[in-house]
Amino acid sequence: MRWELATAWPWPSVEEIERRFEELIRDRWATGPPAPPADVFVAGESIWVELDLPGVEITDVHVRTEAGCLWIEAMRRPRPPSASARAARVERPRGALRRAVPLPSGLQAQPVEVTLEAGVLRVRLHREGPS
């Protein structure tokens, strides 16, 4: 009889345990906003930096160069599907996102082009001088 009661207990799934553990680690030991993944490409005189920013509007993105880095700061705001919707589960990070991408020397001070399409931010910088 005891075995039947023990197996009937509503244990969480392995996926749920892993998700809760990741949240605990992120919330307990994170030192700042999450850093979205980035790719850097060199094409002729241009350097392209791409970041994944799904759910972010271009008006909530700030891009600048400082101290040899391209700094990208963004805000992911909660956007429920309707005014009456309430969250039943929230897993995607919200709030501030920040990323510093080290740049090679010889770049102009300001980005040339900044676009956000399909959740991917693309920043193009122009290379100055010899590569």
Image: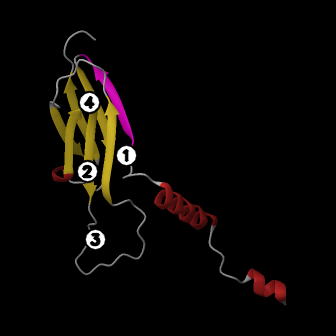
Q: Nearer the viewer, mark 1 or mark 3?
A: 1
- Residue 123: quarter of image: top left
Q: Which numbered marker is on residue 36?
A: 1
Q: Position of residue 14 (x, y in %)?
A: 63, 64
Q: CA distance from mark 3 to mark 2?
A: 19 Å
Can you give x and y, in whole percent of width and height, for residue 131 in the image?
28, 11
Image vertical order of residue 122 relative to residue 73, above or below: above
Tag 2 residue: 74
Q: Nearer the viewer, residue 80 or 25?
A: 25
Number of residues whose C-alpha sits closer than 10 Å to that of mark 3, classed few (under 14), some (14–19) or many (20 or more): few
Instruction: Count neighbours of disc 2 (C-alpha within 10 A) and say few if under 14, some if 14 to 19, many if 20 or more.
Output: many
Q: Which mark is residue 80?
A: 3
Q: Earlier in the sequence, mark 3 or mark 2?
A: 2
Kindly identify which residue carries mark 4: 67
Q: Name the residue located 17 percent from the left edge and 27 percent from the top edge.
A: 109
Q: Secondary structure at mark 3?
A: loop
- State the CA–CA distance, disc 1 to disc 2: 10 Å
Q: Residues within 10 Å of mark 1 (few under 14, many from 20)?
A: some
Q: Which residues are magenta?
A: 35-44
> Where 20 sits versus 102, above or below?
below
Please tell me which of labels 4 and 1 falls first in the chain.
1
